[in-house]
Image (tube, coloured by chain):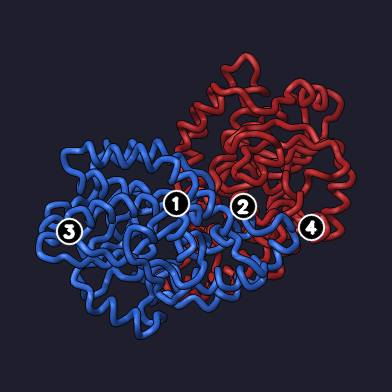
Chain colours: A red, B blue
Amino acid sequence: MKSHLDCFPCFLRQSLIALRFGTNDEWLQQSVLKSTLEDIRKADTSKPPAYTTTFIHRRIRQMLGKDPFRSIKSECNRHALNLYPSLKISVEKSDDPLWMSTRLAIAGNVIDFGIFTSVDIEGTISNALNNQLAVDDYLEFQDALSSTDEILYLADNAGEIVFDRLLIETLISTGKTVLAVVKGGPVINDATLEDAAESGLANVCEVIDNGSDAVGTILEWTPESFKKIFKNARLVISKGQGNFETLGGAEKKIFFLFQSKCDVVSKELGLPKGSMLLKKS
Amino acid sequence: MKSHLDCFPCFLRQSLIALRFGTNDEWLQQSVLKSTLEDIRKADTSKPPAYTTTFIHRRIRQMLGKDPFRSIKSECNRHALNLYPSLKISVEKSDDPLWMSTRLAIAGNVIDFGIFTSVDIEGTISNALNNQLAVDDYLEFQDALSSTDEILYLADNAGEIVFDRLLIETLISTGKTVLAVVKGGPVINDATLEDAAESGLANVCEVIDNGSDAVGTILEWTPESFKKIFKNARLVISKGQGNFETLGGAEKKIFFLFQSKCDVVSKELGLPKGSMLLKKS
């Protein structure tokens, strides 16, 4: 998808969230915020908003001299791990563990401190299981899974990655091999290898990083090694709105599991903001 | 009040509203929007946000080669004039015409196309009359009116100015002399002499312009002639959030009639967004 002018105010809003996680110094916040205006000025609206936000968050980390989301990411992982045992029982007791763990993986996508400043995790889990998906390609998802044993799984956020672990464990229990992919460097609250370790996912399946600190998956910015893995993948499970923004047009069998969190993406999809999707590419 | 970093995204959001009123050309919208980033970069946060928005809206008008709000302002005036006869009867039938017309003047403040893209005028009028004001200095207002016969009335928006006319007519009917003030040039949807004429206010009392195209009333940018009028005023009625932002700290007996329309101002006031106020300086 391309960037919309409505993304411009949101670029600043998201920058402010990052800056407030990163420092209490209001002059530093202002100085960095004003610097990000240069990235907005250069925004190429023919590209997804993820391009501009990648530049912005690089600048924020560089000017703050740290990853502002590191501690909140670990907090998200810990919070999600506290929920893990009871969620694991829900999956195991379910008549359809794939359905249950898929729904939980979508529910986990709401834990996005890059956009929200507070979340109601338990309520969201309950909603995700009880409310219909706005787009529900579950039958096609089951069908796709029946024709391949190898899955490339693009994770999204810290915390959420514990929910991904539930789905990945379910897939592995049915004989699948899953290669999970996290970010090559910190960006917003996206999961990195550190989060794969903290969440326990690294003990469940092979986890690689995509060699990139971009929001979503901007293939042209990933190294050849990752491009090759993506190209050869027979089935991709893609988490989060950022990956949908950047891979929505890819020539690949992808199932996008996410919640549409902003007005622009929701409008493109023709759905209300906050809709949950299991959407075939 | 000073500007907050939360005003920065809002500067862009408001610019976009103005641009969409002004042109359907998305490339022009983008070009102007990106130009306004320079005004945001220069924002002096020790000053009210009205300073930055004044620069932004000057730039927008200059780059579009027109006032993007002119036609919507006339539409607001017409819509409000349609309501005028029944509102006038409500005032005249009221046990306390001053109370009724003051409340209506506050209700009229919601007609602000600079911030909102749609409004429910009739519902707002009903709410304004039936809900309590968050700050209600009506007794002090009555008291102040009893000790002077001359009132300086700072109008805010087109459309709303018809509601101001109801209050001004009530004041005149009790023997007061009212000097109404509009903007010296177009800015957002603020009332100018053209709107004073369209609304019929110009036939009710003397109307002058403040010689400035600033959002709110930035005294240092007004000509000496207006500074003198303001300085000598014994009682000022000030409409709208912009005037509160810019005159909130003035050494002057002012009654501010407005709705707090943004998070930043509401937080400064310690009130929920959307609160209605009749607030003594």
Q: Name the residue under label 3.
A: B175
Chain letter, disc 3 residue = B
CA distance for labels 2 and 4: 24 Å
Q: Nearer the viewer, mark 4 or mark 1?
A: 1
Q: How many marks?
A: 4
| Drawn side of residue B174 relative to residue B19, left or right | left
Callout 4–callout 1 Cβ contact below 8 Å: no
Q: Mark 1 points at which residue?
A: B159
**Element class at badge 1:** loop
Q: Tell me where residue A261 appears, x and y as whole percent.
A: 59, 43
- Dividing the picture into quadrants, the one containing residue A51 is bottom right
Q: Name the residue under label 4.
A: A46
Looking at the rendered image, the quarter that the C terminus of chain A falls into is top right
| Drawn side of residue A265 relative to residue A128, left or right | right
Rate crowding at label 3 as few (under 14), some (14 to 19) or many (20 or more) other CA atoms within 10 Å. Answer: few
**Element class at badge 4:** loop
Callout 2–callout 4 Cβ contact below 8 Å: no
Q: Which amino acid does label 2 sit on?
A: Asp
Q: What residue type is labelled 4?
A: Ser
